[in-house]
């Protein structure tokens, strides 16, 4: 069965990056309880002082969609939106091979 992956970059003002990382880290903690979540990793962009990346691997797109209903996720999204600048860059992916997959 194919896995479902997402990769996205969020941009914020450099002074807000730690706040955004904290919000996304809390989301990652919530994903520990999400059925079908294989990975949810938050990264700071080395070359962009306001850039934050997230990669996710799920058993299915449906599992990802269900994770958005976990208590607290909507609140975290609401906290992140005002400090995100521009349109997030994202892609839906089909993970096919690698360590941990």
Image (spheres, rainbow, N blue to C red):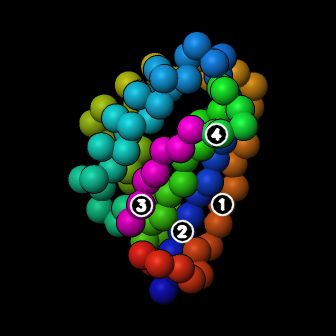
Mark 4 and mark 3 in contact? Answer it, CB < 8 Å: no
Q: CA distance from mark 4 to mark 2?
A: 23 Å
Q: Give the label on residue 3, or none.
A: none
Q: Foreground mark, 3 or 2?
A: 3
Sequence-first disc among 3 and 1:
3
Mark 1 and mark 2 in contact? Answer it, CB < 8 Å: yes
Sequence-first disc among 1 and 2:
2
Sequence-first disc among 4 and 2:
2
Residue reaching furthest to the left: 33
Assign a secondary structure to mark 4. loop
Residue with the mark numbered 2: 4
Q: CA distance from mark 3 to mark 1?
A: 14 Å
Was residue 78 drawn as part of the magenta stretch in this picture?
no
Q: Foreground mark, 3 or 1?
A: 3
Q: CA distance from mark 1 to mark 2?
A: 7 Å
Q: Residues within 10 Å of mark 3 (few under 14, many from 20)?
A: some
Q: Give the label on residue 45, or none.
A: 4
Residue with the mark numbered 1: 92
**Residue at horizontal 34%, vertical 35%?**
26
Residue nearest the observer in this picture, 12 or 49: 49
Tell me which segment is drawn in magenta.
Answer: 38-44
Q: Residues within 10 Å of mark 1 (few under 14, many from 20)?
A: few
């Amino acid at each position: 069965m194919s896995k479902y992956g997402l990769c996205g970059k969020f941009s914020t003002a450099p002074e807000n990056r730690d706040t955004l990382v904290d919000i996304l880290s809390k989301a990652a903690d919530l994903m520990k309880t999400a059925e079908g979540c294989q990975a949810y990793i938050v990264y700071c962009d080395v070359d962009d002082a306001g850039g934050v990346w997230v990669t996710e691997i799920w058993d299915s797109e449906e599992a990802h969609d269900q994770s958005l209903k976990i208590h607290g996720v909507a609140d975290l999204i609401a906290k992140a939106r005002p400090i995100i600048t521009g349109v997030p860059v994202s892609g839906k992916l089909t993970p096919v091979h690698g360590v941990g997959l």
